[in-house]
Image: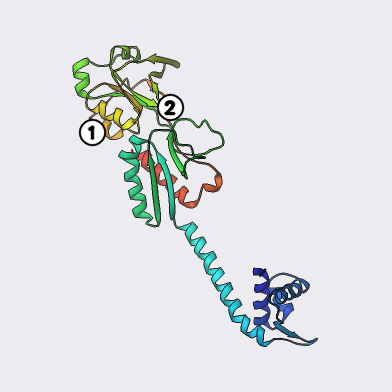
Amino acid sequence: MLRLDDLTVFVRTADSGSLSAAARQLSISPALASAALKRLESVLGWRLFARTTRSLRLTEEGENYLRHAREALRLLQEGQEALQQGQETPGGLLKIAMPSDLGRNYLMHWLDEFQTRYPRVSFQLSVSDRVSDLYRQPVDLAIRYGRLDDSSLVALPLAPGNRRVLVAAPAYLERYGALTSPQALLQHNCLRFMVEEVIHDRWQFHVGGELQQWHVQGNRSADDADVVRRWAVAGLGIAYKSRLDLADDIRTGRLRVLLPDILGEAAPLNMLCMHRQHITPTVLQLRDFLRERCSQA
């Protein structure tokens, strides 16, 4: 089997006309250089150099083979440079799983911006509130709310300080009145979210340094967080959702934050991957870009 090092020794020796000079250029011993040439000749089945005690010259076969060896080394160098360039400029296909509400209303637009900036990047998106299994699904990255339960995954924080907030539309508040305390949720229609068929109906808050939990009720629940947000905007009840999901609705007044002085559940947003080897320069560029957009939102 041909070895790259042997080809390099051959070309350097032919260029310098001296085995010892080639060895010095490559920082190896003359014995190693000589062994490389013998190994190459053995693989090819031809003598490449005619050797005497005072001279070293290419044979006819060596002259013919030299241009092929040069071309092979040139192509390999170009390939290495192309790989390095690819590492410096984001590119390639990223398969990303993302939550429905944030995915549809924010991430898709942010990824459009990222792709405009880096056109060599391609995306394959999975938009769902079901918890993606990175080990079973064809996914490179998962953008997910919540604390990391699987310690074998690598988390790249996007919005580590994000929390849930209580919100309702002005029309709902005009009809049913303002919320005065977390306990008052028991008298309101609460719009609840389901994960894996389990309804998230125990809403937690930090009140005066104490953790409180209230078992809320309502006439609607969905396994799609975007649907829950739309119900809230339509004035159908109170929602308890990630503030990041609601940023535009709060800013435009479609939804109002209730009990703003009470601290809601932590809902950190992370970008997850299976191994640190998967954290390529493209992934890091995307992490930095999305982190900036989350901060602005």
Residue 54 at what x, y percent from top left?
78, 87
Task: Kindly indicate the quadrant of the structure image that contains residue 223.
Answer: top left
Q: Nearer the viewer, residue 286 or 151?
A: 151
Q: Residues within 10 Å of mark 1 (few under 14, many from 20)?
A: few
At mark 2, the secondary structure is loop
Residue 104 at what x, y percent from top left?
32, 39
Q: Residues within 10 Å of mark 2 (few under 14, many from 20)?
A: some
Q: Relative to residue 191, is residue 286 depicted above or below?
A: below
Side (left or right) of 46 relative to 221: right
Q: Quadrant of the C terminus?
A: top left
The three-letter amino acid code for the residue at tag 2 is: Ala
Residue 209 at what x, y percent from top left?
45, 17
Q: Is residue 148 visible?
A: yes
Residue drawn at 50 percent across, 50 percent down: 280
Q: Is residue 255 visible?
A: no
Marking on residue 252: 1
Q: Residue furthest right?
A: 53
At mark 1, the secondary structure is helix
Residue drawn at 39 percent across, 28 percent down: 163
Residue drawn at 32 percent across, 15 percent down: 185
Marking on residue 266: 2
Residue 155 at what x, y percent from top left?
50, 38
Q: CA distance from mark 2 to mark 1?
A: 24 Å
Count of marks overlaid on the render: 2
